[in-house]
Each structure stands twice: as structure tokens, then as C-alpha cells.
Amino acid sequence: MPLLPALQDPAGAPAAAEAVRFGEQSLSYERLAAAADALASRIAEAGRVAVWANATPETVVAVVAALRAGVPAVPLNPKTGERELAHIVSDSAPSTVLAAAGDVLPPALAALVRVDVDTNAAPRTRSTGFPEPSPESPALIVYTSGTTGPPKGAVLPRRAVAATLDALEDAWQWTGDDVLVHALPLFHVHGLILGVLGPLRRGGSVRHLGRFSTEGVARELESGGTMLFGVPTMYHRIAEALDGPAASAGLAKALAGARLLVSGSAALPVHDHERIAAATGRRVIERYGMTETLMNTGVRADGEARPGTVGAPLRGVELRLVEEDGSALADPAAIGEIQVRGPNLFTGYLNRPEATAAALTTDGWFRTGDMATLDPDGYVRIVGRKATDLIKSGGYKIGAGEIENALLDHPGVREAAVTGEPDPDLGERIVAWVVPTDPASPPPADELASHVAAQLSPHKRPRTVRYLDALPRNDLGKIMKRSLHG
């Protein structure tokens, strides 16, 4: 099966149907196929291409063209700093950069051949005859966030993209009738692969908001949107807009009418889950994935939306929890590191054989670095990253996530993050970073500690509380805990 069957042959595509929309700019399947094939003919010998991945129709055309031509695409975040961008370009060595005609490109891309993307190519009269590449051939090279060093390029084969999108079709009953609404960036897995290639593989459509707003969400869901993808920051803003005396009845109605509300890229706090459910009668479901593995687990459309969990493994994905030394958990209910195996995995890090070998076991399991517990029915509860969210205090292994959820239940806490810091007595002490609801009157530290101890247990209470105006977050809304220092 082709990766994008609806675009493979004009006779088989829903030609007049809308494929993508960005504000007032819309491309039908016919126009998208024509523009992508015209560009694919120009880049067929390019080796690798970089894509200046603004949230525009040109980015979609560029990526689809690269996939049609069988040329690996390297999506670039336009907000990336000069040093990091230079590293990515040097490491991936694209010959060409694809961009919208009006884009101003930085000096790091000056040595590349620039090709401006034209979204107005004439409709095809016959197939241009691009052969379907091997399932193992690279589709995309997506760079990781680089929290422990320079970003690494994860090589994602066509096989992994297809396997993930088909597993989500199964889990979410995703069809060509679905209209997906989102405002996610197009340089990463969530917004590009799930949020654009997902609808296009199904023959459905995607409406990109450009810049996220609750008004935009309400407008697009009210006018035919069936699914909403977002990150916790977006759902937090939705929850805020649904709460209190100024609550938006229009937003609540629009969300209630959606078939599926999906959150990903980080854990959605239970407090926001409950506020949205109370206002709309709809539960947000979560899924779990990584750049290197694409999607691993997900709550099914016909399953139980259980706050604090990311569902069970998707079709074709094997998942296990292990001790720090890689052995099986002695206690099945304990916290362990997630390892996954399946057709959704990357083929390795570009130019980094040592890093690839370190990430994979000898029998093909990927070491995610994420810590979790398993519910009896196989639902996964992620407690955080091994490096930043697993706190070893007083002989206990403690996940930061459950403490964060407990803190968010306190009315005086708007946002919260939890980290561990060295402690001569405990090994590590629990530190809470709190954005108070009322900055002029933050809740006292001892009150927050008692609140957590009463909800969880005394050894999970914060020993230190630090107050902030805002938590540091990246483009996907993830809290950057490595930026939190005492």
C-alpha cells in the first residue's frame, strides 16, 4: 500500500475534497497532488531536502513532494537558534532547502540550493509515475530536542510512519470522513506525522489554526471538525476558558460535539481532565510516543478515558517495564523503565552508531528513558523521565507526575513542576516549583506539603517549594525541567 494512497493516483483521490486548510488558504486533494508532484519532479535527485517548516500549505506540499520523490525530508523549526540550526544542517547534509517564496532564511542555510514551493501547479492529467520506495527507506529525519547534548537526527522509515498511522486508525476508528483540527508545529512528529500525514493517509482533511486560540478551536469544531489534537498547554487554556463565571458556552458545545479530543507530547494534569469533562461531558484521551518510536500506546476511541494514563500498547507494539539493570520487574506493580519493540521504531540516529547501539537492546527493544507503572488491564501510567522525573528519596522511588497532579488540586496552584535535588540525608529531596493562582498571596510551603501528604503519603511531600511567575516550556508545551535550578 502506498504511504499516501489518496494522493498516489488522481483517479483514486477525492479530487475536489479539501485536504488541508490554513486560515483562508485551502488545498484540495487535486491541487495538493499537482503541487507536490511538480515539486517532486524538481527534487528527485536531491539526496536529502530540508523543509523550512512554518505552519503553512507550502510545508505540507514540500513534505508530500519529498515523500512522493522518495527523498528524505528534514523538517526545520524556524525558531531554532543559529548554533543548533548549523549543527542540524551540518549533520543531515541536505543539498536543498524547500521554503515558501516569502520566507527569509537564516545564514546557516545559505549554502543550500533554495527551491520555492508553488502551491498553484496545474492539475495533473496523468500519473507522473513516481515508484513507491521501499518500506525501509527513510521518509523523514526528525531531530530530537537535544536536552542531553546536540540534537540527534532520528531516521524514520516509511514503514514506521505507516505502522503508526494504521495503528491509530484501528485505535481511534479514524476514517476519511474525519476532519482534524489542530495548531501544532509542523517540524515534529505530533503536528506533522500525526496531524498532517494522518489525515492524508486516510483521505480526510486537516484544518490548521495557525496560532492556537480557544475561539479558533470552537469555530472549526462547530463547522465540521470531528477531532482535536493538542498538547497540555492548549488543553489547560481550554479548561480555563470553560471555568468560572465567564465560561464559554460556545466552546463547551463545540467540544461536546467532537468525536475525539486527543492530548499528547506531555502528561495532561488530572485537574484539567476533570474540568473539561465537567463542562463538556467529553473526556480527553491521551497517547504516548517519542520521536524515535512514533506512537506506542493510546486510549482507544471505544475504551475508557482514564485520567493519568496513556492507554494500552497500540496494535503491533510490544511494551515492557524493566529495572534499572534491564531485568524484569520484581514487583509487577512497581515503577519501571518503558522499553518498546515493533514496526513503529526508527532505524537509528543519523551518523551516530554509538548512540543507536546505546538506545537499543541486542534483541531490538528501544530504551525510552520513561518511567511508568502498569494497571492490571495493561493501561500505562507514565510517572516521568528517568533522568528528571524519577526521584529517589529516603529509599523510595517516587514519580514526579503524581505529586504535580496533587499540587494542581490545590486552589492556590495554577501550574506546578516537581524535581529532585541532592540531599545528604534523603539522597534526593522533593522540590516543588509552583506558579500561584494569586501571585500576591501564594499558598505557604507547609500548607502545600501537608496537602500532598494527605492526598498521597508523607514521604511524597515536597521538602522545598519555590515560586515562579511561569514555568519554562518548549514549543510543544513540555516543561523544561533542566532549566529549573535552585
Image (spheres, rainbow, N blue to C red):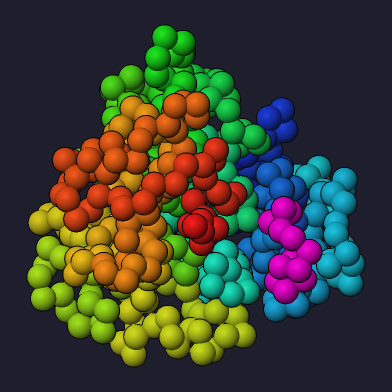
Residue 129 is situated, as x and y percent measured from the top left of the image, at: 68, 65
- Compared with residue 169, is residue 217 higher up or lower down, i.e. above or below? above
Residue 333 is situated, as x and y percent measured from the top left of the image, at: 12, 63
Task: Name the residue located 62 percent from the left edge and 85 percent from the top edge.
Answer: 351
Which quadrant of the view contains residue 51?
bottom right
Residue positioned most to the top: 245
Task: Name the residue located 70 percent from the left edge and 71 percent from the top edge.
Answer: 88
Residue 245 is situated, as x and y percent measured from the top left of the image, at: 42, 9
- Compared with residue 395, is residue 115 higher up or lower down, i.e. above or below? above
Asked if residue 221 shows in the view, the reply is no
Q: Is residue 479 left or right of residue 171?
A: right
Which quadrant of the view contains residue 14?
top right
> Foreground: 68 or 298?
298
Task: Name the residue located 61 percent from the left edge and 71 percent from the top edge.
Answer: 151
Q: In this view, does 260 lie to the left or right of 379?
A: right
Asked if residue 327 shows in the view, the reply is yes
Residue 85, magenta (yes or no): yes
Magenta range is 77-88
Task: Name the residue located 42 percent from the left edge and 31 percent from the top edge.
Answer: 442
- Compared with residue 439, is residue 71 higher up or lower down, i.e. above or below? below
> Foreground: 165 or 78?
78
> Foreground: 108 or 259?
108
